[in-house]
Amino acid sequence: MTSTSSPPRTIRIASRKSQLALVQTYWVRDQLQQQFPDHTFEVEMMSTQGDKILDVALSKIGDKGLFTKELEVGLLNKTADFAVHSLKDLPTRLPEGLMLGCVTERVDPADALVVAQQHKDKQLETLPPGTVVGTSSLRRLAQLRYHFPHLEFKDIRGNLNTRLAKLDNGEYDAIILAVAGLERLGMGDRIHQVIPAEISLHAVGQGALGIECREGDTEILSILQAISHPPTTARALAERAFLRELEGGCQVPIGVNTEITGQNLTLTGMVASLDGQRLIKDEVTGPASDAEQLGINLAHQLKEQGAQEILAEIFAQIER
Ligand SMILES: NCc1[nH]cc(CCC(=O)O)c1CC(=O)O
């Protein structure tokens, strides 16, 4: 039992209303309630802009904290004390007055292939030419086009259930989703193949939860320490520094992989063109305690190798 010196109080947790968001938020609440039985943890559900426009192509909107803004307003006006996000949806630059309070232990950050019945005997590598693969992520699109130019890619929108329904009713032969989302929603049995990192590097922060709170709120920060996971935190800091330095958002074809070996962290990163014709990939290794510097270094390495041109082309195409 973690002891707390602060007197019992009610702590309010901001969450989006989606099924995945609530599963994640309730997990955080349950962990903290167990560790701090004298406090009361309440969940405040908030709608975000992103919830209302999920059917609009996100690639046209860019990364402006679409899924986080209303929760952040709630933190700043003290309607809530901290907010639970999929770390992947949390922009790398936070509004003034807010900070990343902690990062929880990551589940598998990989992407998953989910296939229609008639393709159950195949893997990504053996899907026939013209197979229609649904994905809304430019990162997944660019990497899969690079490796499998014979496949056909089609945009897909909506929450997890909507996407699975579109696969099941024949609109797609296969779709790509995050392993983490499927598993958290108890739909891990839909995963047909976990896509290896050699084919698709995952999104920055994928599979981890990021808890955002007010800067300098020492009481909340000390409570959040109870669910912080230091190895995931080091990986997340490296990944987020890499993305920040490239000035990419969640809608830019930037992928990463991180591994911790002893005291060292290895960060692999890639930037790809939307047509999947060019893909620049490299890695850095160094002390995990220098996580952010490693991310910055890798961003510079990729820029020197041509990532700058690819990103400039993409930024010119999408509204930012
Ligand atoms: N972009 C939406 C999103 N944000 C977080 C997850 C779940 C996986 C995670 O926590 O990284 C998903 C779904 C997906 O990418 O398939």
Image (tube, rainbow, N blue to C red):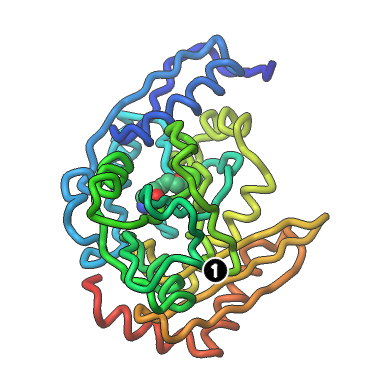
Q: What residue did someone put label 1 on?
A: 199
Q: Is 174 displayed left or right of 203 in the figure?
A: left
- Provide the secondary structure element on which disc 1 rests: loop
Q: Residues within 10 Å of mark 1 (few under 14, many from 20)?
A: some
Quadrant (top left/top right/bottom left/bottom right) for the N terminus: top right
Q: Note whether 103 is above or below 240 in the view shown.
A: above
Q: Note whether 78 is above or below 131 in the view shown.
A: above
Q: Is 228 displayed left or right of 272 in the figure?
A: right
Which x, y percent locates residue 15?
Answer: 35, 33
Which x, y percent locates residue 64?
Answer: 29, 59
The quadrant in which residue 261 appears is bottom right
The quadrant in which residue 25 appears is top left
Number of numbered callouts drawn: 1
From the viewer's side, name the closer residue of 251 and 96.
251
Q: Residue at x 26, y 62 (%)?
A: 155
User: Seen from this angle, which residue lies furthest right?
Assistant: 262
Q: Residue at x 83, y 55 (%)?
A: 262
Is the CB–ligand 1 distance for label 1 below 8 Å? no
From the viewer's side, name the closer residue of 163 and 272.
163
**Would residue 98 be seen by someone viewing this image from the given angle?**
no
Q: Residue at x 40, y 85 (%)?
A: 310
From the viewer's side, name the closer residue of 246 and 115.
115
Which x, y percent locates residue 182?
Answer: 44, 40
**Would residue 51 be seen by someone viewing this image from the given angle?**
yes
Which x, y percent locates residue 19?
Answer: 33, 32
Q: Note whether 171 is above or below 59 in the view shown.
A: above
Q: Note whether 275 is above or below 65 in the view shown.
A: below
Amino acid beneath label 1: Ile
Q: Residue at x 51, y 53 (%)?
A: 205
From the viewer's side, name the closer residue of 76 and 196.
196
Quadrant (top left/top right/bottom left/bottom right) for the C terminus: bottom left
